[in-house]
Image (spheres, rainbow, N blue to C red):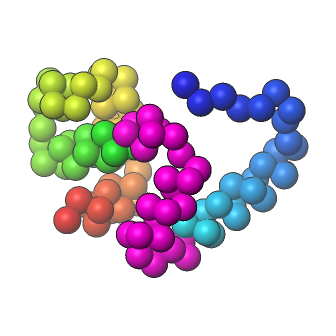
Amino acid sequence: MPKISRLSLTETEMQHLTDAFWQVLAQLRTPKDIKTLLAGFLTHTEVKMFAKRLEAVKMLLNDASYSDIRNKLKLTDAPIARLNNLLNEHKAFQDMAKRLSR
């Protein structure tokens, strides 16, 4: 499990860093650029977790059952339910997920 430093930043400082992170991601243009950046920052396990969650979202959009997702991706119900709630409660997330699942 990822760990955050015990030396904390202020909420304002963290917000500034997070906003800068989103801006960098928004500027990436090619899959190679995205892979280069994220492979440098994320562990192999984090990449696998992200990929499995993305596939779970695609499966949910295609009406797969929790059981099917659990069996195929070896996820527990908790992350599947969280993703399902995001899809059901946030139209913007659902729209973005549909674009990614094409």
Q: Position of residue 101 (x, y in %)?
A: 23, 59
Quadrant location, the C terminus: bottom left
Q: Position of residue 64 (x, y in %)?
A: 12, 38
Q: What residue is drawn where x is 24% and y is 25%? A: 74
Is 15 placed above or below 26 here? above
Magenta stretch, residue numbers? 26-49
Quadrant location, the N terminus: top right
Q: Position of residue 57 (x, y in %)?
A: 27, 45
Q: Quadrant of residue 21?
A: bottom right
* Residue 88 shows in this picture: no
State left or right for residue 98 relative to residue 39.
left
Determine the main secondary structure of the stretch shown in magenta.
helix
Q: What residue is drawn where x is 37% and y is 29%? A: 79
Q: How many marks?
A: 0
State left or right for residue 69 relative to residue 29.
left
Residue situated in front as seen by the camera: 15 or 25: 25
Residue 48 in magenta stretch: yes
Q: What residue is drawn where x is 70% and y is 64%? A: 20
* Residue 40 shows in this picture: yes
Q: What residue is drawn where x is 75% and y is 56%? A: 17
Residue 65 in magenta stretch: no
Q: Quadrant of residue 51?
A: top left
State left or right for residue 17 relative to residue 87.
right
